[in-house]
Amino acid sequence: MGKRLKQVYDAFLVLDVEATCVEGSDFAYPNEIIEWPVCLLRWKDANVKGKTRELEIVAEFRSFVRPTWRPQLSEFCQALTGITQEQVDSASTFPEVLQDFRKFLEEHELLDEAGHRLARFCFCSDGPYDIRDFVVKQCFISKIPVPAWLSGDVMDVRRVVGEWHDANTAAAVERRQVNVGAFPLPRRMTFPIPRQLHALGLEPFVGRQHSGIDDTRNICRLVIELARRGWRLEPNTAINPNRRWPWMGKRGKVLEEYYS
């Protein structure tokens, strides 16, 4: 177990959205969010000096989301995420879900009624994509601005696990406990959650991969373990709420010539 640190943030919001997709699509596709799962982590052992190392899940928020640009889910998307057409058909739209989520943040004293932060919190995700790409795209399609409380910098947990791996492998090499190159760090796209769990010596993935809530809970396990090992948890990914893709037309319109 690592030493206690005076961490910068009071709480962490771990998020792993699921979004519409078709077979062969990439991150340039106009994805619409169809599952919004968040786990709230808080410290449980801060001492009088504010130093801590133990996080716990204190609340969860989960909602399916009804897409509006392409309401019909592809068979590929349903097979990948496990989300059914019936689940999204009966769900609220993204602006409505975002309002419900904001109430969740108010109930847990993270935001006031005006949307101002009451505590220092940081969103966390596996890779930079969830807020940097999916949320920005979805807000464009929904014709709403990215809320200020959602547009701050994000902690890419995959990157942090990689940094921890590099630091500890280098230290082990320095102590001559392992051979150089014994544990090559996977590239970002080949370092999924199960491999990150293994890298930290944790039990295998629990649940169904690509289920948003199951992915989110397993990312929480990574964040909790990093904190336990005394790793400083802070943002490492900038968010540009005004980012644009070629398919974006005027006033939230998706240019159909790109995906007709």
Image (cartoon, rainbow, N blue to C red):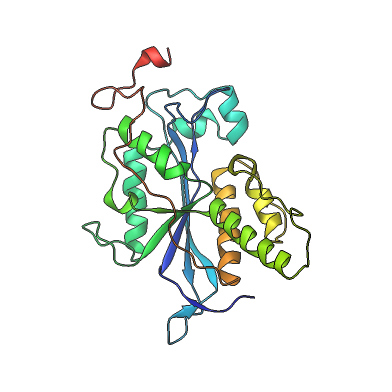
Dividing the image into 4 quarters, which one contains the N terminus?
Answer: bottom right
Which residue occupies 43% across, 57% down? 235
Q: Residue furthest left?
A: 114
- Res 211 quadrant in image: top right
Of the pair 202 and 63, the residue shown nearer to us: 202
Out of 95 and 91, give the one closest to the viewer: 95
Q: Is residue 147 above or below residue 13?
A: above
Residue 232 spot, x, y in % from top left: 50, 68
User: Quick check: 69 left or right of 156?
Assistant: left
Query: Which quadrant would the C terminus be assigned to in this image?
Result: top left
The percent coordinates of residue 121 (x first, y second) are 38, 62
Residue 46 vertical position relative to residue 40 in the rendered view, above or below: below
Residue 29 placement (x, y as % from top left): 45, 26
**Is residue 93 among the parts visible in the rendering?**
no
**Furthest residue to the bottom?**
48
Residue 105 in picture, x, y percent from top left? 35, 58
Q: Left or right: where does residue 164 sit relative to residue 16?
A: right
Counting labels gives 0
Query: Which residue does the image show at 47% across and 33% down from the upper left?
Result: 88
Residue, x 67% and y 67% (percent of image)?
171
Residue 11 seen in render: yes
